[in-house]
Image (spheres, helix red, strand yellow):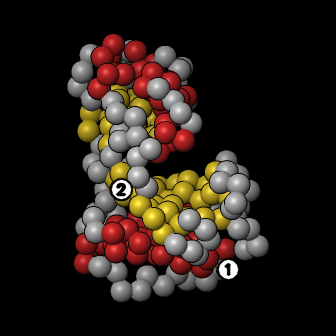
Amino acid sequence: MEEAEGIFAVKLARCAVDAEVGNEAPDAGMAPASFDEKRGVFVTLNTYPDGELRGCIGFPEPVYPLGEAIIQAAKHACHDPRFNDLQKDETVTVEVSILTVPELLTVKAEDRPKAIQIGKDGLIMEKGYYRGLLLPQVAVEWEWNNEEFLSHACAKAGLRANAWKSSETRVFTFQAEIYSEVSPRGEIRRYEEK
């Protein structure tokens, strides 16, 4: 993805967030043609200047065209069930993660820690009806090692922390291009692996 497209993605998400908290319809503007391609996407809202999570919702699978996926994820992030609804007077930054298609990790369960790269891979855990996702940047932000990342992804799915050790648990990896506001409505930067 070109940097200009990543910047547009964040501006589109910001427009959708502002419209949602203002009870208005978002203006998609003139999206690049690439935004018609179906992509997985997550929109993350963080408090400013504290940087605490305020909402994060998205679509792991490429089920919507990118432009529509960004707008829907941004609107839903304002109503993340883990938090109260976002209010107009709150100050947040917007981050957009555009995902590759998740791929099943096909190594033996005991080799899973060696098969993932912190800062590059995101994880999806799946067992029966249980499913949870952690974006690639989460492990870096929390300074988790590979096993900790797997364990936290299991917990996110509602599974025991060591469920990744079971062959019955399916582990998917994906990568993401991540762009975020440095300050609310301010400069937009591409996330660089630390």
Q: Which quadrant does the C terminus fall into?
A: top left
**Image mark for residue 22:** 1
> Could you tell whether 160 is left or right of 28 in the image?
right
Judged from this view, the residue extending furthest toward the front is: 194
Residue 55 position within the rendered picture, expressed as x and y whole percent measured from the top left:
61, 55
**Image mark for residue 180:** none
Identify the secondary structure beneath mark 2.
strand
Q: Which quadrant does the N terminus fall into?
A: bottom left
Which comes before the other along the chain, label 1 or label 2? 1
Residue 189 position within the rendered picture, expressed as x and y whole percent measured from the top left:
45, 65
Judged from this view, the residue extending furthest toward the right is: 89
Q: Is residue 25 above or below residue 1?
A: below
Q: Amino acid at mark 2?
A: Glu
Q: Is residue 18 above or below residue 66?
A: below
Q: Is residue 127 above or below residue 51?
A: above
Which image quadrant for residue 24? bottom right
Mark closer to the observer (1, 2): 2
> Could you tell whether 2 is left or right of 69 in the image?
left
